[in-house]
């Protein structure tokens, strides 16, 4: 017989929350750093299964010398038909640090995946999500949403309570990060893997192809960086020292 | 109630640790590429072991329709017969002049019938044609149709010995690389001599290149020069790039 335990004002961050929070923080920085490096190597994004320098891009970012470098030899069409796919040899030494970039990305990925799964399982078993993260039914009103939105826009951020007592917007953004953004990043990441998609082809269907998965991966990671910026601003506004103490030593 | 909670948590931790231990144990019974005391290579090996332990054996990579074939950039070495580049190889230049009629591929090592296979010899084997997606480590993809002989047919033809563990590939532009037997005997792993219904272009690895459809593009070595079958991992030194790139 389990009663839903209501969040108490005295609740503090539990040890497993703190440990997974900081491991995932470090892995997130490594992932963003190496992800940016990889974006610089091929700063073009596409939709569907296929995309390369010889096909049109959805968008291109001017972030390295690889941006529109144009170092291609005369193209060879594969068939006689007009508009046939072509082959062209690259004549330009591109920026490419993917040797360590990719390996560090995947190593950091393990440090997101394992603590992330640990966090999800414990979060469900202990009722952490139910009690602290998931908005309650009575909280989900448009009026409350707007009130909370306005107080945030006016930068009237309440002082830290040194524990998991969250407002509606805060809960909604944590739900978005924990249950939507990070799972999407992990799954689109796996959709770029030839071995994993051979074993689980539904991933290619789910994300409309390998290049769409890469584009979604990029957009989701930019969203997470934006979340991080807001997260840090809120921590500073609500009392930086207290917040860091609450997430580390817990006093 | 409090007690019940503790047991659940402990159970979760124990289950997690046990499955992690299973992963590590699996790695002990298999030969692994060296890590060079480099944490990145340790991570690569963890990914390799996890893929081998968790992914079903030899699932086929997605195959596409002829109309899906796309433009295909040629990167890395695009002509080992070009004397102006540092990847120049004189033998390759000579073979290229004769349209690779004198080219042949020695297959040696842990096999009972070592031999050398000309292009015509390879073409006598039942061919496999498939249309697959090439995934480059740089981030781009391209779809092409590849025609060639399954590596498994060749390995059976030379009589691969039970002690064999790795297949090593050497190229005219100076690369050495290897794959394990699971990928070597994967039905889509072929020695390709045709691309998009024509002979393989020089810029895509003529006369014969490897295709490993379950790994990143750079594993599909161009300009094959020699194959050796070995019982142990042949250490090419730390190239700075992951050896296993199923990801």
Image (tube, coloured by chain):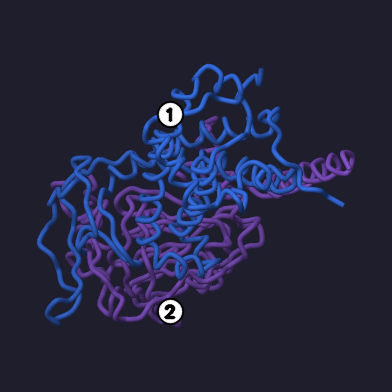
Chain colours: A blue, B purple
Q: Is residue A117 visible?
A: yes
What kind of element bears circle 1?
loop
Task: Look at the picture and state if B183 lies above or below B170.
Answer: below
Task: Give how far apart the Cα atoms at labels 2 and 1 are.
Answer: 67 Å
Is the residue marked by circle 1 packed among few (<14), some (14-19), or many (20+) residues within 10 Å?
few
Report the residue at 61% width, 65% height from top.
B57
Circles 2 and 1 on the same subunit:
no
In the rendering, at what x and y percent does residue A233 appear? 41, 28
| B69 relative position to A129: left or right | left
Report the residue at 50% width, 59% height from top.
B108
In the rendered structure, find residue A156 and report the number of the disc placed on it: 1
Which residue is at the front of the view, A1 or A52? A1
Q: Quadrant of residue B126?
A: bottom left
Is the residue marked by circle 2 packed among few (<14), some (14-19), or many (20+) residues within 10 Å?
some
Mark 2 or 1: in front is: 1
Which residue is at the front of the view, B97 or B173? B173
Q: Residue furthest front?
A: A143
Report the residue at 18% width, 46% height from top.
A67
| A67 relative position to B8: left or right | left
In the rendering, at what x and y percent does residue B172 appear? 31, 54
In the rendered structure, find residue B124 and report the number of the disc placed on it: none
**Chain at tag 2:** B
What residue does disc 2 label?
A: B128
| A213 relative position to B16: left or right | left
Report the residue at 37% width, 54% height from top.
B218
């Amino acid at each position: 017989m389990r009663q839903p335990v209501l969040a108490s004002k005295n609740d503090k961050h539990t040890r497993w929350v703190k440990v997974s929070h900081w491991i995932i923080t470090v892995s997130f920085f490594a992932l963003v750093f190496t992800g940016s490096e990889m974006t610089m190597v091929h700063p073009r994004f596409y939709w569907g299964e296929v995309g390369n320098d010889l096909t049109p891009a959805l968008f291109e970012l001017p972030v390295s010398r690889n941006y529109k470098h144009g170092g291609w030899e005369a193209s060879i069409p594969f068939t006689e038909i007009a508009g046939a796919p072509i082959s062209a040899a690259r004549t330009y030494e591109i920026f490419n640090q993917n040797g360590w970039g990719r390996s560090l990305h995947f190593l950091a990925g393990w440090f997101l995946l394992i603590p992330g799964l640990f966090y999800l399982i414990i979060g469900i078993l202990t009722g952490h999500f139910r009690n602290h993260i998931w908005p309650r039914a009575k909280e989900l009103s448009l009026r409350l949403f707007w009130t909370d939105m306005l107080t945030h826009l006016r930068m009237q951020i309440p002082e830290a309570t040194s524990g998991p007592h969250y407002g509606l917007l805060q809960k909604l953004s944590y739900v978005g990060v924990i249950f939507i953004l990070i799972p999407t990043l992990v799954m689109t990441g796996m959709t770029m893997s030839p071995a994993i998609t051979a074993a689980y082809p539904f991933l290619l269907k789910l994300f409309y192809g390998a290049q769409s998965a890469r584009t979604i991966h990029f957009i989701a990671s930019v969203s997470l960086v934006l979340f991080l910026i807001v997260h840090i601003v809120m921590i500073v506004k609500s009392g930086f020292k207290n917040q860091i103490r609450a997430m580390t030593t817990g006093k | 109630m409090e007690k019940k909670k503790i047991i659940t948590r402990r159970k979760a931790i124990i289950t997690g640790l046990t499955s992690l231990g299973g992963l590590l144990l699996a790695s002990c019974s298999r030969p692994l590429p060296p890590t060079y005391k480099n944490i990145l290579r340790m991570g690569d090996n963890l990914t390799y072991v996890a893929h081998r332990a968790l992914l079903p054996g030899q699932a086929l990579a997605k195959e596409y329709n002829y109309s899906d074939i796309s433009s295909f950039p040629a990167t890395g070495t695009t002509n080992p017969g070009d004397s102006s580049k540092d990847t120049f190889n004189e033998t390759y230049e000579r073979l290229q002049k004769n349209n690779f009629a004198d080219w042949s591929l020695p297959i040696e090592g842990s096999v009972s019938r070592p031999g050398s296979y000309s292009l015509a010899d390879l073409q006598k084997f039942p061919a496999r044609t498939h249309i697959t997606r090439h995934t480059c480590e740089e981030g781009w993809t391209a779809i092409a149709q590849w025609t060639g002989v399954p590596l498994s047919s060749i390995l059976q033809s030379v009589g691969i010995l039970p002690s064999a563990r790795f297949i090593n590939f050497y190229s005219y532009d100076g690369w050495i690389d290897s794959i394990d037997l699971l990928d070597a005997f994967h039905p889509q792993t072929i020695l390709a001599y045709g691309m998009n219904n024509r002979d393989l272009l020089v810029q895509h690895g003529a006369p014969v290149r490897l295709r490993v459809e379950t790994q990143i593009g750079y594993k599909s070595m161009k300009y094959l020069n020699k194959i050796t079958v070995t019982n142990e991992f042949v250490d090419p030194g730390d190239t700075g790039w992951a050896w296993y790139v199923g990801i």
